[in-house]
Image: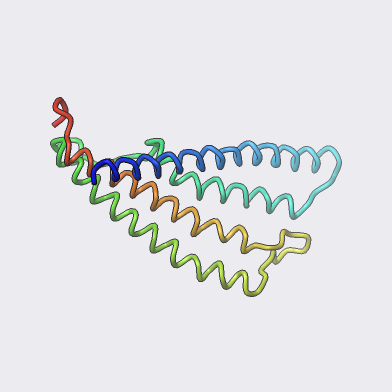
Amino acid sequence: MLPLIKTLSDGAHGTVRVIGNIAAWTGLALVLLVAFNVLSRYLFSFGSVALQEAEWHLMAVAALFGMSYGLNQGGEVRVDIAYARFPPRLQLAVDLIGNLLMAAVALIIAWLCIAYVSASYSINEGSPDPGGLGYRYLLKATMPVAFALLALQSLAMTGHSLLALLHPHPNKS
């Protein structure tokens, strides 16, 4: 059973890392798009509502997928005065419970987002601004996917915490 938990946790961790690396390229796309919008507006007096909206769409995708990737890479900020003073096994137990709760909340949010996306799809929602982007439901569809990915990363971390609790390293506990 423990090798299966390790395999699944490592696989989920790797999947989130790969998806995060792909999503990180939206940062470059965003910088290039903003530069293009600024240069075209000031040098050629050209502006496009759709391109300005695309900036926000890229930012949203980067932020949504950045949640799970940041967690995957250990980039979360931990501000816990008591946790630092806990013994290592208690820290692992806190991590285990916290990761399970985060997975549950992420799955609930992903589930709730599905109705939001469905409503947007049913009316073929687009930008309310003339010349804006259509198919807004495609952007909204990234929300349940991103929160499901966050739940996957949380479950991977839960598995790693469980393994560490069940088989502590001799020099750590």
Residue situated furthest top in the rendering: 171
Q: Considering the image in quadrants, where does the C terminus appear?
A: top left
Q: Is residue 134 left or right of residue 104?
A: right
Q: Position of residue 75 (x, y in %)?
A: 40, 36
Image height check: is 114 above or below 66? below
Image height check: is 112 above or below 48? below
Q: Give the mark count.
A: 0
Q: Quadrant of residue 82?
A: top left
Residue situated furthest right in the rendering: 44
**Residue closer to the observer: 39 or 152:** 152
What residue do we see at 42% from left, 50% from top? Answer: 150
Q: Position of residue 107 (x, y in %)?
A: 39, 60
What residue do we see at 65% from left, 74% from top? Answer: 123
What residue do we see at 20% from left, 41% from top? Answer: 92
Q: Is residue 22 left or right of residue 93?
A: right
Q: Quadrant of residue 110?
A: bottom left
**Residue closer to the observer: 149 or 46:** 149
Q: Position of residue 25 (x, y in %)?
A: 60, 38
Q: Position of residue 54 (x, y in %)?
A: 68, 51
What residue do we see at 46% from left, 39% from top? Answer: 17
Q: Quadrant of residue 170?
A: top left
Colouring mode (rainbow / by chain / secondary structure / one colour):
rainbow
Image height check: is 148 above or below 165? below
